[in-house]
Every structure is written in structure tokens, then in C-alpha cells.
Image: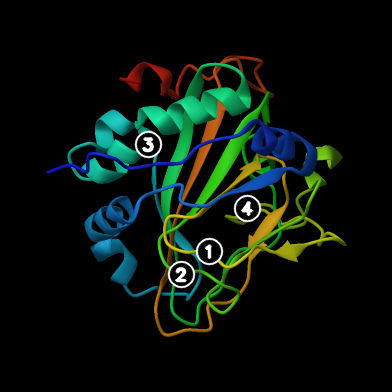
Amino acid sequence: MLMTNASNFVLTEEMIEEFYREGFFYAPGFLTQEAVDKINKENTEFATQQSNDGKWKSNPTVSLAKSQAQFPETVNFLSNTRIIESFERILGDDVKLWMGMYAVVPPRGEGLAWHQDNMYTHILGHMLNGFVALDHITQENAGLWLAPRSHRLGRQKDLNEAGETHRRAADPDNGAPCKPMAPGDAVIFHRETLHHSKTNHTDLPRRAYAFQVASAVCRYAETGKLLTDREDLSPYKK
């Protein structure tokens, strides 16, 4: 049976102001413990798979409809009315799912270098990222780091060689570790906020769920076209 209440989170105007001013805000209790447990359960196989290179890995989705059969609890959380309404308030419009991903840093594994997600596909318009802890997460197990106000700097240059999978920005002067996070806690941040994670020093995988959500009026920088290939979230509201 699907969980009946994925979130009790209450968004405040102060959080929205902090998102635009600082580039992020903390969202304690973003998901319920029931939601965390059920999302982890349906991703157990991926989380426990041996990693060949000991680095961060993810299991992404760009379509709730196509993911419903295999990951119903994850879809239930991403289509939750309370959560979608929070996204709409932050971005000031109807919203689209750019991507969701179950993200794991393997035991003794490495996270990702400093980057902005807008260094991948260049999108114009307001977008947000979410990082939801699915374990107790601290700097001991590859906790997230953020650089306050770095979203004001614009899209950064990629320092990696052409053809590499991931992007890498210059290390910011003001990068700081996030607070320790309990399962279900989240950080919501701007798509151009610099962030990264370090090493998982434990013998357990570090599990989190990351998502990226776009305003319905966002456009691809290269073509100027709307994101018509991405799924609308707003119609999922009940």
C-alpha cells in the first residue's frame, strides 16, 4: 500500500526569501520517516550494488509515468500535492520535473567536485534543486557542501577535460558544510548554487534523493525552446 502522507513540510516566506538571497534553505522534515523507509526499500538493490570505481552513483528518472510501476513510492513523493505547491510558490509558476535521482556514495567512496547543475544542460529561468537525506548524513559520510550566494555569480566554467562525465567548477572561497541531516531532512537550493560532497568515511552507503524542478517558462539556452520534453508536475496536484 502506498504511503498516505509523504510530507508534513510547511514552506514559509522566509525560506523563499533565503532561497533567492543565499541560494538555499534548509527544509527539516521534508519527508516523513515512512516515506524515507519506503523509498529506500524500493531502491535497495541499487543502493547495495558494488561500485566498480568507488564513486558517487545515481539512478535517475525524468518521467513519473514511466517510473510508476518500478518506483511507486518515489513517484508518490514527487507527485505529492503539498510538495508540488511548495515548488510552485518558490518558482512562482507551474512546474516541471527536470530530473529525480536516487543518489548513493558507496562505502569509503567519493562524492562529486564543486559544480553547478546548470553547468550540464544550460537552462534559462528559475530552477531549484533538492537534496533529501535518506540516512543520517554528516561530513563523516559525504555530507553536502554549499557556497552561499554563489548563484549570483552566473554559470561557471567547466574545468574538466572535454568528454568527462561530470562537471567541475573552481573551488569557492566560502564553501561550507551543511548541518547534520536526519532522514527526511532536505536542503533546497538554486540550480546555479555551487555544491559538492566529499568522502564517505563509513562502511555503509550514503543514501539521498536529489531532484531538479523547473518553472514552466524555463527555456533551453541553446535553442530558446520551452522544456516541452519534460513532465508537468502541477497537474498531479489533488
Any mark on residue 6, and which? none
Alpha carbon distance from label 2 to label 1: 6 Å
Between circles 2 and 4, the one closer to the viewer is 2
Rendered image quadrant of residue 102: bottom left
Circles 2 and 3: CB atoms closer than 8 Å: no
Q: Secondary structure at mark 2?
A: loop
Q: Is residue 232 above or below residue 168?
A: above
Any mark on residue 181, and which? 1
Amino acid tagged 4? Gly
Between circles 3 and 1, the one closer to the viewer is 1
Amino acid tagged 1? Met
Q: Is residue 234 above or below residue 180?
A: above
Amino acid tagged 2? His
Amino acid tagged 3? Leu
**Residue at the disc numbered 4:** 163
Looking at the image, tell me whether mark 2 or mark 1 is earlier in sequence order: 2
Query: How many C-alpha atoms fall within 10 Å of the one at disc 4: few (<14), some, or many (≥20)?
Result: few
Alpha carbon distance from label 4 to label 3: 32 Å
Alpha carbon distance from label 2 to label 4: 34 Å
Residue at the spot 31% in from the left edge and 32% down from the top edge = 64
**Residue at the disc numbered 3:** 78
